[in-house]
Amino acid sequence: MSVNTNITKKERDCIVSIWQGSRSGFPVRVSTIAEAMKVKPPTVEELLERLESKKLIERSKGMVILSEDGKRVYRRIMLGHRALETFLVQCGDDADKACEMISNFDYMIDEHTASLVLNRLGNPSECPHGRPILEN
Ligand SMILES: [Zn+2]
């Protein structure tokens, strides 16, 4: 399956929240995602149904995890996000402002474009926030 799955901004935010919420190694609950996204649980339920039909998440007993494809999509989002973020900060933009702005379209950036930007930047390993360009 192509990792350039078509997703919406809300689905992107949901994927990022699931990843961040489960960094401790445990699956996240709908309420945790709703809180992180600042939306109501029914909205999250709706998003999860869409992500589930795209096979990007798996659910069991109210807990949510990213599927292998979901993780690939997350890594692709972050690759584009951190490539452009690094570029804008090198241009003199504020890191937090760049981060917020890029979050609006990072999910549309394909790996090829991200790697072109990273090549031009000399293949940095970390973004301006010290996070790895390539997530494990
Ligand atoms: Zn960022």
Image (cartoon, helix red, strand yellow):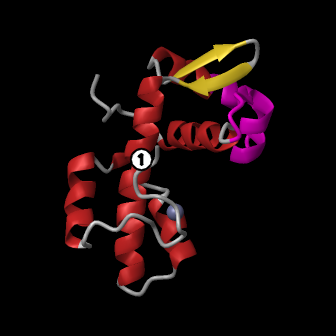
Front one among 130 and 52: 130
Q: The residue tagged with tag 1: helix, strand or loop?
A: helix
Residue at image mark 1? 77
Q: Amino acid at mark 1?
A: Ile
The residue furthest bottom is 92
Can residue 38 be seen?
Answer: no
Horizontal and vertical percent position of residue 29 = 76, 28
Q: Is residue 86 above or below residue 83?
A: below
Front one among 82 and 51: 82
- On screen, residue 32 versus residue 46, left or right, reads right
Q: Which corner quadrant of the image does residue 116 belong to? A: bottom left
Horizontal and vertical percent position of residue 8 = 46, 38
Q: Which residues are magenta?
A: 24-46
Q: Is residue 29 magenta?
A: yes
- On screen, residue 73 versus residue 58, left or right, reads left
Quarter of the image where the N terminus is located: top left
Front one among 24 and 31: 24
- On screen, residue 51 versus residue 21, left or right, reads left
Q: Is residue 128 above or below residue 15?
A: below
Q: Is residue 4 above or below residue 82?
A: above
Front one among 45 and 73: 73
Q: Residue at x 41, y 26 (%)?
A: 69
Q: Which corner quadrant of the image does residue 34 belong to? A: top right
Q: Residue at x 54, y 69 (%)?
A: 129
- On screen, residue 81 versus residue 99, left or right, reads left
Q: Residue at x 27, y 56 (%)?
A: 114
Q: Is residue 82 magenta?
A: no
Q: What kind of secondary structure does the magenta stretch mostly adopt?
A: helix
Can residue 44 be seen?
Answer: yes
Horizontal and vertical percent position of residue 7 = 42, 35
Horizontal and vertical percent position of residue 91 = 35, 84
Q: Residue at x 34, y 31 (%)?
A: 5
